[in-house]
Amino acid sequence: MSTNNNKKNGNHFEEEFCELLALHGFWAHNMAQNQVGQPADVIAVKNGIPVLIDCKECETNRFPLSRIEGNQEGAMTLWEQTGNEHCYFAMKLKDGRIYMVSFDELMLRQLYSEGTITEKEFPQYKTFRQWVEEFE
């Protein structure tokens, strides 16, 4: 798939994800218009809890950690260092399931040289519905 198609699909998922968050009572802002140096895709807030989120489509039902860009890692690290605790990657599989994987969990995987989340491993993470319930 070409880079333009990946970007188009990714932008569609970001919009879809913001709408999904809004349906569940979040204020959500899609930062897609800030393409230069964009460290994440969405900032969402519910009940006074801010969350920084990057949206990733996993068309092969796998997520190589190499897809985490340096500016994303830097921004999420700084987000946490400044007192914010919630950084997530929203990962959409080809069947539409969305899993929420925390930035900290991804950094642990990198630390232990686990370079890819496989289709079999996704169910160990929270589904979008399970994740939303934590904010109720």
Image: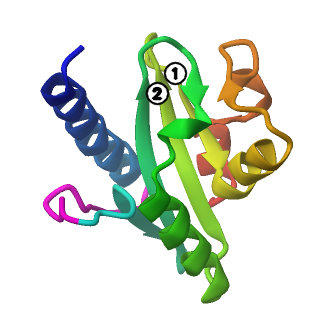
**Callout 1: 10 Å neighbours few (<14), some, many (20+)?**
few
At horizontal 51% and vertical 46% (from top left) the residue drawn is 68
Where residue 118 sits in the image (x, y, percent)? 68, 18
At horizontal 67% and vertical 73% (from top left) the residue drawn is 85
Q: Is residue 89 above or below residue 123?
A: below
At horizontal 52% and vertical 69% (from top left) the residue drawn is 74
User: For the residue labelled by badge 1, is the local secondary structure a helix, a strand or a loop?
Assistant: loop
User: For the residue labelled by badge 2, is the local secondary structure a helix, a strand or a loop?
Assistant: strand
Residue 103 lies in quadrant: bottom right
Q: Amino acid at mark 1?
A: Arg
Q: Name the residue beneath numbered marker 1.
A: 97
Where residue 24 sits in the image (x, y, percent)? 44, 50
Q: Name the residue beneath numbered marker 2.
A: 92
Where residue 61 sits in the image (x, y, percent)? 54, 14
Residue 24 visible at all: no
Q: Is residue 28 magenta?
A: yes
Magenta segment, which residues? 25-36
Q: Main secondary structure of the magenta part?
A: loop
Residue 115 lies in quadrant: top right
**Left or right: 114 as drawn, with respect to 62:** right
Do tag 1 and tag 2 residues touch (Cβ < 8 Å)? yes
